Amino acid sequence: MAASPPASSEANNADYTRVPASNVALTESDLPWAELAAIPETYATA
């Protein structure tokens, strides 16, 4: 299982999540977390 990075102390989000490792893809990016978080939504609605 993989854990997400801790959420900002100002956000009302979970600090961690559990998912099967087969559902996780390692990616290197210089994008900020807010933009990275939008990628699945953009992909799913395209």
Image (cartoon, grey):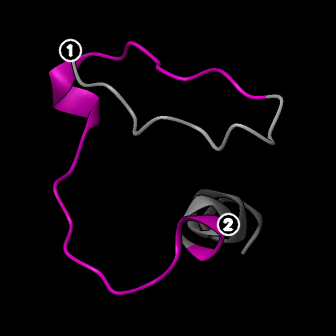
Of 19 and 7, which appears nearest the observer? Answer: 7
* Residue visible at 39% across and 34% down in the picture: 4
Mark 1–mark 2 CB contact (< 8 Å): no
Q: Position of residue 26 (x, y in %)?
A: 16, 55
Residue annotated with mark 1: 1
Based on the picture, tell me whether residue 31 belongs to the magenta stretch.
yes
Residue type at tag 2: Ala
Viewed as shown, does residue 9 lie left or right of 36? right
Of 42 and 29, which appears nearest the observer? Answer: 29
Q: Which residues are magenta?
A: 13-35
* Residue visible at 35% across and 17% down in the picture: 19
Q: Is residue 46 above or below residue 17?
A: below
Label 1 crowd (10 A; few <14 / some 14-19 / many >=20): few
Q: Quadrant of residue 42?
A: bottom right
Q: Dot 2 lies on which element?
A: helix
Viewed as shown, does residue 35 lie left or right of 1? right
- Cα distance, mark 1 to mark 2? 22 Å
Residue type at tag 1: Met
